[in-house]
Image: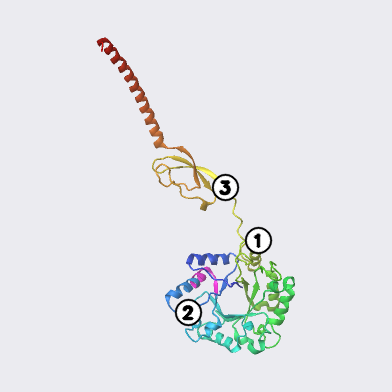
Amino acid sequence: MIFIAWPWSPGGSESSIRSGYNQLLSLGINAFCSYHHIDDYKDSSAATDWYDRVYRIANEMGIRVIWYTGIHRLNYKGAKTGESFIRRYSKFPACAGFTYGDEPNYQGWGHSDCKWAVDEAHRQGASPSKNPMFAAFGYDLSVNYTKTYTPGCEIFDIGCADCYPTALAGGDWKSFLQYWVNHGYHRPNNDGFGDCGKGMIAVIQAYIEPSGKWPNMMPDLVGQYNVWKAKYGGQLKEIGFYLPHIAANKGGFLDSGSLGDNLRSQIRKLTGGPPPPPPPPPETFTIQETTCPQDKSVFRVKVSSVAEHNKALACPVDGTVLPLRGVEITEIVAIPLIDTLKKQIAALDEKIAELQGKIVETSAEINEIKEFLGV
């Protein structure tokens, strides 16, 4: 099964893209749906380099990519960036499809426009089985249904719907979701989307609503999956974990803190992803000796158990870099140059004392001679 971060976009540089993909893979998530608009896309290297990099690294790391094109872009009379985009990226192995809009039933888009988007994607090279064109419909298909979506099976290559039951119904989320899965998206008549046999993507609530009627209520991700699975069975092909555009650290499954940890734990139960890494051990310090490369002075250095907390240290005597990284120099053990100077000074002191003694003796002899001469 494909598990999708929805919506999610990678960073700009290769390192940030890889870091983002690794974060998803650590949760067992193997795909993402990007809402990064393709307005900037042109058939030129300046614009395609980033998109190429995103798809290339995704294929290398085992990530599937779904891109939001937007019907208003596909239907645009000018540059037709959507068609160019699909024509190019449907050929990339990591391409898992395209969406032409978000909740078109709530926006009242016409059936003919939705069908045109799907047909146009096919004309540009998108394959219904390899990189399908679809839209994420809102759970209540009664909105504009008769006007817009009959027959529904024509306007997508794979079914897709979203419903965020805890945000909408609080503690009554399960009966709410069951009702809409059975009577909303999956309609009992012949043109109901659930009867198309094309497969299904369920986009479930994977965030905590920070405000509203039921703030901070934890959604049951496994429970939501079970409701969708009970209706669609083997037709349920993909699960999208919805991460809304809300403030950071306010309830998303990629946020830090205990709420994010809870959501990530639930995601791993669904995906079979690896358990979270154990917390790092507490930082400890040791005192170690090191020697200056040139003058062989010896110092004691405080070294942290956290490697990134240690830094390069300079020898206080000659300024060369010490071979041991640490937090700080704590003690001088031996400085050969100073010890040598001390010995030389001590020897000079002895010489001076000896000379001073001789001067005293010589002065006495001079005084005796002066006395004898009566000077």
- Residue identifier under label 2: 88
Residue 110 vs residue 239, the one in the foreground: 110
Q: Which amino acid is tagged 1? A: Ser
- How far apart are the two marked residues, 2 and 1, measured between alpha carbons? 42 Å
Q: Earlier in the sequence, mark 1 or mark 3?
A: 1
* Quarter residue 150 falls in: bottom right
Q: Which mark is residue 328?
A: none
In this rendering, which labeled residue sits more in front, label 2 or label 1? Answer: 1
* Residue 23 magenta-highlighted: no
Q: Percent position (x, y) of residue 300?
A: 49, 41
* Residue 61 magenta-highlighted: yes
* Numbered disc 2: secondary structure: helix
Specify few, some or many for label 1: CA neighbours under 10 Å numbering under 14, 14-19, or 20 or more. few
Residue 58 vs residue 5, the one in the foreground: 5
- Residue identifier under label 3: 284
Cβ–Cβ below 8 Å for labels 1 and 3?
no
Q: Percent position (x, y) of residue 99?
A: 57, 79
Q: Residue at x 56, y 65 (%)?
A: 23
Name the magenta segment's main secondary structure. helix
Q: Which amino acid is tagged 2? A: Arg
Specify few, some or many for label 2: CA neighbours under 10 Å numbering under 14, 14-19, or 20 or more. some
Q: Which amino acid is tagged 3? A: Thr
Cβ–Cβ below 8 Å for labels 2 and 1?
no
* Numbered disc 3: secondary structure: loop
Q: Which residues are magenta?
A: 55-65
- Establish if 127 lies above or below 366: below
Can the viewer see residue 150?
no
- How far apart are the two marked residues, 2 and 3, measured between alpha carbons? 53 Å
* Quarter residue 317 falls in: top left
Q: Percent position (x, y) of residue 283?
A: 57, 49
Q: Which mark is residue 258?
A: 1
